[in-house]
Image (spheres, rainbow, N blue to C red):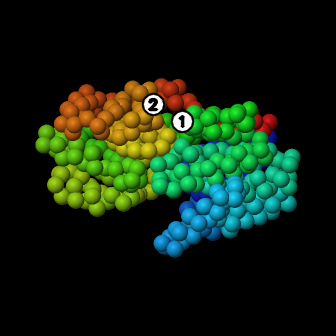
Amino acid sequence: MNKIAVLSTFYSETSANGICAKNIVTELKKAGHIVDVICYETRCQKTENDESIHSFTCPKKQKKTIFSRLFFKIQLAFKLLFGIGEPVFNKSLITNYYNILSQLKNTKKIDTVIAMYFPAESLKAAVKFKKKNPNVKLLNYELDSVGDGVAAKSKMFSFTNRIYEKWLKKAYADVDSVIIMHSHINYWMNTFGKMYSDKLRITDLPVLYAKTQFSSTRSECISMVYAGVIQKKFRSPSYLLEVLYEISKTLDFKFDFFSKGDCENEIAEAAKKIKGISQSGYIPQDELQKVISNSDFLISIGNSVSRSVPSKIIDYISHGKPIIHFSSQKDDVCNEYFDKYPLALIVDETQPVTYSCTEIIEFINKNRGKTVDKEEIKKIFFMNDPAYSAKIISDIII
């Protein structure tokens, strides 16, 4: 038995980080560990008698002006010029994490601290705590990657990446183990492997809970669902909407967008021309799971950049439904998952729309009503079982 403190952003069913944190904590508790969670107050699902969740006010994002962006760039330039290996941190966030950790140490023994990265401040606070409490084990659980994630192609990326990498190389010296997602192995080894390969452990997004029931209902109209964030910059719906327009000439379907982002107007305009499209926005997770379970096909849009796997991909897979994935990136990391999944079609967005429509209609006709057995899912995607991550953590700290 180990007494563990987990530093997360959210701890709930409403964000990817929160879901991952909650799943891991659940499995660690099943393994017999005592776990306390330090997280943002907003969206924190705290039960009336749950004394293991310690929340603080979520830091508000400041609206960036031209002057604030300029000041931020000057700060980074100054750091690069003088070789200062520290990113620009939110000091309030670090203080909150650190102070609650210190309070926990005074009220109960802490054997292990797990920093869920991002945010970088969770690791910064954990390292500060480790320096004052060297007997405590420190694990950095990296759900995303500083140099291999969504921000990898941003204009500021090349400017800031060197600072983050330099800081991480220094921070890793105080970390006992670094746990990364499978898709980021090559980047991590090329960047940090020479110094810290002995500290590395590999897992994958801990969000696979194979559903026990699959809907057997089948209406005359084909039902399709997209759930998740849509951003023009890295996950555009344009090709999908073109395909839906062409398919609507042949098939009757109902397509629900449970989405948010900067493309909602584009989807609304397409809905005026394409019969069957509806926009429902974000809905509670339990409601969304029911909608997905009652749909014929699940639709995914891959990122145009990054090696980060959207958690929604694993959630889709756990339902065992046929999945149609739209891929715009040459080396789309999602393809590695769908190549192993028995009921998936990968649509290459470089192909003509008419070609993709033919592929999709054939896939729909062949696979409507089929599912993948939950035991087969667990066998193929065992690294995505939260129990797998919990075992890795247990093996490190015991």
Residue 249 visible in the shown view = yes
Amino acid at dot 2:
Glu
Separation of residues labelled 1 and 2 (CA atoms)? 9 Å
Question: Which is nearer the N-term, disc 1 or disc 2?
Answer: 1
Along the line of sight, the residue nearer the viewer: 162 or 11: 162
Report the front residue among 248 and 180. 180
Q: Position of residue 354 (x, y in %)?
A: 18, 36
- How many numbered discs? 2
Q: What is the secondary structure assignment of the residue under circle 1?
A: helix
Amino acid type, residue under disc 1 in the picture: Ser
In the rendered image, residue 98, in percent from the top left (x then y), is placed at 75, 61
Q: Would residue 349 be found to the left or right of residue 121 on screen?
A: left
Please identify the quadrant where the N terminus is shown: top right
Q: Any mark on residue 277, and which?
A: none
Q: Residue at x 17, y 51 (%)?
A: 275
Does 291 sit left or right of 364 as displayed? right
Q: What residue is at 24 percent from the left and 52 percent from the top?
A: 277
- Farthest residue to the left: give it: 249
| Extreme-front residue of the structure | 81
For mark 2, what is the residue?
336
Residue at 45%, 32% (x, y): give it. 337
- Quadrant location of residue 367? top left
The residue that mark 1 highlights is 183
Residue 33's image quarter? top right
Residues at badges 1 and 2 in contact (C-beta under 8 Å)? yes
